[in-house]
Amino acid sequence: MMAVKEAPSNLFIGINTQQSEEKVDRVVKRVEKNLEKQGYEIEYVDELERVIALSIRDRKQEFEELNTENSDEYVNKFVLDEIKHLGLPQVILRRDASIDASMGASVTSGDISVIPPLASGDKVLLMDKHYNIVAHGVAVMSSEEIKRSPGRVAIRTEESRYDVPKFDTHKIYNSGMMFVSTLPRFLGASLFDFSDDKANILVISQDSGEIAVHLLNQAPPGSKIYLFVKNDNHKEALEATLERLLVDPENVEFITRSLDRYAKSRPRVKFSHFYLELPSTESGKRPNPYFDMEEKTIISNARTQFSAIRSVALIGDNNAQVSYVTHSIDPTENEEVVVQAFRQGTFVPVELHSELRNKYKHGINALPEIPTVTQAGSIDLDKLEFEKGYSISWLGIDPRDQSSDAGFVAKLQLKLK
């Protein structure tokens, strides 16, 4: 399966505040001032609440444009053939680490797949597995120390391919006023409707808890979020995020069991909202080198996603809202899972606003009896025609139109018999 390759030209930032209008305005002004100081033009995403889109630069492309005009004067620092004469050590990174480094993140020892001989202070090229230069950095440790020191910062990134705002050193970030996420996540969070009653929101997400905080800030006062924890490291990351984003611990509860086991235990809490972003192939995440994903992996993801939606029926209130989010471009993990949930009869599609559906258009492919779930293979054309109507409940994020990561978002409603 192919993936979306180039990096998005937009970065999406959420403003973290409670509902007080005065506080929102004050925080927004501070965030805007901080970003304008760094030279970024701010554009708000109309259909999303308190979300900013920033344009980021592709330095490789900029060097190529400079080369066109002054080929003798400039060298493209991100093309290996042009800078080979510098003789810099070439550090090959694992896939996820190469994506992070291209966006400015430093590299830990466990993220390196090939380490050349290095001394502390050496300048290095950071490359992905296809030998594309993603960044330039400086070794913090020697190659021998890197091998002996798992988990420590090994290389400090000095110049990445993609220019992004600097947050970690600014009080505005550390004091919980802003966070970076993806357009599919923000869209998924925006689909919920809240009444004046307190909401119990169950969140499964592949980030470090930022989108859960975003949901909590949209919900009525006194609402609570329930976060699934994968392991101790994940819990530490969630706790750090909640502390940075100034969340009252009383409004959060961690769940350490799997969703399936938790649902079968029939907990006393009934949930009014479910945010489900289960593991997917992330073929829509960018920058993303071409990779081959085995069909069995996609099928395994789809079964897990469908099983999670089905578990929701055991622990949700009648009319509970479900937001289903992926970063995948494969229909097996997207509309096929959602249609199969509708076929079970427990969920109904929720018609999304026409402006959203026009901006984030996404049709429906020919759907058999979803072999990922039922192992059947026939296509009922009358059923297919009927099920085309389900597309009122989902959105597709196309990077060519939205300058973002690709993905899929759907809204379902639980109907208990």
Image: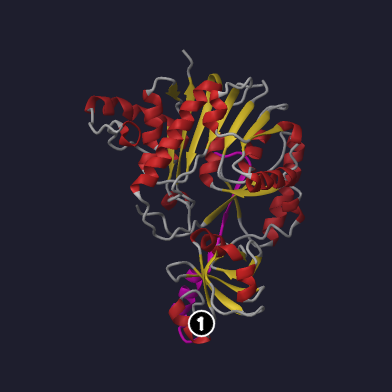
Amino acid at the residue labelled 1 = Tyr
Q: Residue lying farthest top? A: 417
Identified at 42% across, 47% down, the residue is: 398
Near-viewer residue (410 or 337):
337
What x and y, as percent, mark residue 401?
43, 49
Q: Is residue 218 left or right of residue 249?
A: left
Q: How many marks?
A: 1
User: Is residue 321 depicted above or below 111 in this figure?
Assistant: above
**What residue range appears in magenta?**
47-73
The quarter of the displayed image where residue 165 is located: bottom right
What x and y, as percent, mark residue 356?
47, 36
Residue indicated by mark 1? 74
- SS type, badge 1: loop
**Circle 1: is it few (<14), some (14-19), or many (20+) Cα within 10 Å?**
some
What x and y, as percent, mark residue 123?
61, 79
Identified at 55% across, 34% down, the residue is: 258
Q: Residue lying farthest front? A: 148
User: Is residue 78 depicted above or below 214 in this figure?
Assistant: below
